[in-house]
Image (cartoon, grey):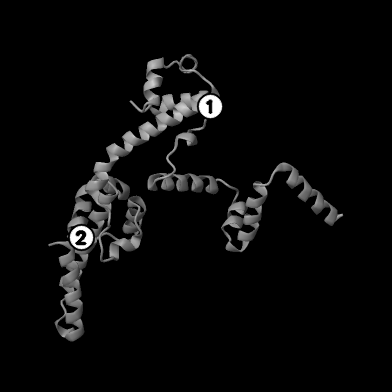
Amino acid sequence: MSFEDFAARMKAKSKSRDNDEKTYDFSESYRIRAKMIGVLLCDARLSAARTVEDCARLLNVSPAQVELWEHGDETPTLPQLELLAYYLDVPVSHFWGMETLKISRGGREDIQPEYVRLRGRMIGALLRQAREETGVSLEALSETCGIPVDQINGYELGEPTPPMHELSVLAASLKKGMEYFLESSSQIGELLATREAWKHFSELPEDVRAFAADPINIGFIHIAVMLSKMPADRLRQIGASILDITM
């Protein structure tokens, strides 16, 4: 039975209950609801590219238990669904909704190799750009990093993409941080940038986080942003003006 069949049967049962309360089959309703939760759980897990074993380890249950949930033979508790929602990157309300996720799993799997190839070429182009901006020759970079000239030349062409430990050395030699090579324009890049921003925000002192998170203080934050973009001489003028006012 497909998910659409589950939903249709639930709606039919609901109408039947409205028309004749006495004939409503509660056990059948619970069974169908358990099946729906199972389908939604399986849907979220596959969309997140997680295995049954992954979810079992997260909740400290057996893989067989997760399979029982996905088949609708048993149902997880709300705390377990909350952990699964966090792990599978879906809102917890997904598990009591009526629609599966819109992501095409086959499309996601097919696009991954192309994404890796494209990003490899982009990283290579950025590597060459950084080297040319600093005026470093291939030979000089090779001597600094201990990587053969032909290998660096291949990296700059994106064939192959440099492994992470070598890219970090190349970046440091060209006075670039790893953020210089990070993806920033795609959905993946935006998500990674958001996670990095959240990491930095969470490391701020508690009082600073509380101030920034309070919507009442948004005006002060806008002022701080504007001040950060002003040239130093303009900032000195503003500082002198404030000092005149307070004296």
**Crowding at label 1, few (<14), some or many (≥20) Cα neighbours within 10 Å?**
few
User: In this view, which residue lies farthest toward the right?
Assistant: 247
Q: Quadrant of residue 95?
A: bottom left
148 over 94 or under it: above or below:
above
Say which residue appears at 17% left-offset and 76% top-offset. 13
Q: Position of residue 23 (x, y in %)?
A: 14, 82
The disc labelled 2 sits on which kind of residue?
Glu
As drawn, the label of residue 160 is none
The secondary structure type at the circle numbered 2 is: loop
- Residue 57 position in % (x across, y down): 29, 45
Does residue 93 appear in this view? Answer: yes
Instruction: Identify the residue shown where x is 19% and y is 52%.
Output: 67
Q: Foreground residue, 17 or 101?
A: 101
Q: Mark 2 packing: few (<14 Cα in 10 Å), some, or many (20+)?
A: some
Between 120 and 205, the residue placed more toward the observer is: 120
Disc 1: which residue: 133
Q: Who's the residue at 28% across and 37% down the image?
A: 113
Q: Residue furthest left?
A: 1
Camera-side residue of 174 and 129: 129
Separation of disc 1 and disc 2 at Cα? 62 Å
Please state the horizontal and vertical placement of residue 134, each as a whole percent of the image.
Answer: 54, 24
Q: Is residue 62 visible?
A: no
Q: Quadrant of the N terminus?
A: bottom left
Name the secondary structure under disc 1: helix
Tell me the number on the disc at residue 74: 2
Disc number lying in front (1 or 2): 1
Q: Residue 84: image x %, image y %?
A: 32, 54
Nearer the observer, 39 or 180 = 180
